[in-house]
Image (tube, rainbow, N blue to C red):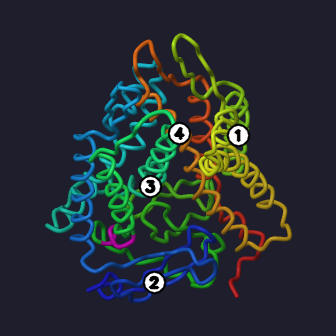
């Protein structure tokens, strides 16, 4: 029996993208419900969702263990062999006195995905056994917030870029860990897609009866209500805006719109813009060979790749490290302005632009991961070595602040000027 079939009342949801209230229809496995106005997915159903999530999470965790245990890449440069494992990409940065960059690389590529997978297994096992646990609610709150910060797929692209950069310098052999990590990245993606947060909260805490005055086809804010950003439940809000309301199912503090959304977004964009200057002005990577040091910036490294015949890789670096951060900052600035001043774009077009911007922002981490790979691989004592430059931390900060800016922006503001009634 599905959640819709076992609930006596209509299961209402307020779209997180446009705030339109809709009733979730009865969904069979393989089907999903989308907002009729903007197309944002409201709920998704899978066949045997608990068993599916556990199987995928266990498989992903096993492949991650294999990826950590075996060699990732072996490099033979003129008789000097160097074999690295996955954890060395972060540990070498730590030894190079870059603890924050090491934490970001190790956390996004290994630690956060591992924590997420263990959490999925623990929580879904409790659901399967119908055993309530307090930490299940905590894990359910964290799940959707962790997705953007797990970057195994970005790390794979960075590894391929590093291999191309090393092709003319040394003989490179891919270890079992590399292929295991590729499988892990795919399984991690499948695991995140297998967890239906809407269905999960129904199993954890049921489906309380919605407010009787709520009508479908209108924005929730116009009816003194809001959709919980954590569990999705539609809650009535007090008439006095100064009173604080909590979700009756998960306890999350509720607001009709994210508090100070535009101000926080603007502050983070300003911070990112300031940090972007040293990220491009200072060296990203410092190579020392036979006592001679050569520092390369993001643009300088891209030009070197182009001159050495690696034009496709140079384009990848240019897009992810130059175009994406700039376009993301400019787009969020434009959307923040359009949230108060209607422009030629429709609300639907602006919403799609926002989600595209949010999606591509994390891919700017490619250049940071490339530096981590090169630092770990090229370590041959006094002959040749690579160290991270001061721009590595600055660029990490740019990526993180732009991602936080996108998260702080409330896309529902783009619909507030379009009228409250859906037609």
Residue topped by disc 4: 165
Residue 147 circle label: 3
The mark closer to the camera, 4 or 2, is 4
On residue 232, the disc is none
- The span picked out in magenta is 198-202
Calculate the distance from the C-alpha at mark 1 to the C-alpha at mark 4. 37 Å
Of the two numbered discs 3 and 2 on the same chain, state the one appearing first in sequence.
2
Secondary structure found at label 2: loop
Identify the residue position indicated by label 1 in the image.
Answer: 267
**Label 3 or label 4, whichever comes before in sequence order:** 3
Helix, strand or loop at label 4? It is: helix
**Left or right of 198 on screen, residue 411:** right
**What is the C-alpha distance between the residues marked 3 and 4?**
29 Å
Residue at the spot of label 2: 24
Q: Nearer the viewer, mark 3 or mark 2?
A: 3
- Residue at the spot x=53%, y=54% of the render? 244
In the rendered image, residue 137, in percent from the top left (x then y), is placed at 31, 56
Task: Indicate which label's residue lies in the foreground, 1 or 4.
Answer: 4
Above/below status of 87 relative to 260: above
Q: Quadrant where the N terminus lies?
A: bottom left
Asked if residue 119 is positioned above or below residue 278 in the image, the reply reads below
Compare residues 322 and 208 and report the one nearer the observer: 322
Q: Callout 1: helix, strand or loop?
A: helix
């Amino acid at each position: 029996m599905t959640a819709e079939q076992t609930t006596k009342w209509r299961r209402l949801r307020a779209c997180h993208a446009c705030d339109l209230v809709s009733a979730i229809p009865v969904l069979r496995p393989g089907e999903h419900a989308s907002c009729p106005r903007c197309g944002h997915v409201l709920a998704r159903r899978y066949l045997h969702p608990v068993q599916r999530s556990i199987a995928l999470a266990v498989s992903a965790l096993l492949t991650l263990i294999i990826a950590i245990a075996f060699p990732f890449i072996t490099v033979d440069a003129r008789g000097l062999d160097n074999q690295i494992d996955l954890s060395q990409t972060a540990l070498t940065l730590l030894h190079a006195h870059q603890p924050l960059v090491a934490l970001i690389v190790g956390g996004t590529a290994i630690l956060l995905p591992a924590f997420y997978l263990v959490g999925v297994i623990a929580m879904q096992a409790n659901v399967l056994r119908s055993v309530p646990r307090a930490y299940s609610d905590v894990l359910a709150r964290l799940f959707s917030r962790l997705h953007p910060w797990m970057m195994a797929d970005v790390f794979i692209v960075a590894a391929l870029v590093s291999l191309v950069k090393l092709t003319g310098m040394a003989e490179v052999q891919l270890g079992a860990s590399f292929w295991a990590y590729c499988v892990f990245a795919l399984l991690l993606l499948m695991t995140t897609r297998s967890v239906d947060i809407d269905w999960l909260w129904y199993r954890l805490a049921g489906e309380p009866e919605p407010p009787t005055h709520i009508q479908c086809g209108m924005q929730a804010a116009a009816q003194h209500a809001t959709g919980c950003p954590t569990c999705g439940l539609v809650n009535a809000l007090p008439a006095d805006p100064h009173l604080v309301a909590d979700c009756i199912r998960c306890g999350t503090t509720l607001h009709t719109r994210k508090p100070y959304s535009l101000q926080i977004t603007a502050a983070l964009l300003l911070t990112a813009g300031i940090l972007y200057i040293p990220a491009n002005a200072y060296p990203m990577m410092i190579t020392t060979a036979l006592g001679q040091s050569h520092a390369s910036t993001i643009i300088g490294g891209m030009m070197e790749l182009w001159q050495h015949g690696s034009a496709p890789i140079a384009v990848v670096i240019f897009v992810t490290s130059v175009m994406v951060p700039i376009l993301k900052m400019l787009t969020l600035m434009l959307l923040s302005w359009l949230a108060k001043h209607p422009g030629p774009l429709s609300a639907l077009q602006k919403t799609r632009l926002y989600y595209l911007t949010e999606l591509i922002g994390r891919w700017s981490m490619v250049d940071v991961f490339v530096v981590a790979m090169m630092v770990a691989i090229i370590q041959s004592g006094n002959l040749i070595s690579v160290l991270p430059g001061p721009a590595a931390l600055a660029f990490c900060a740019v990526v993180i602040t732009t991602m936080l800016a996108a998260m702080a922006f409330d896309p529902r503001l783009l619909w507030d000027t379009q009228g409250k009634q859906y037609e």
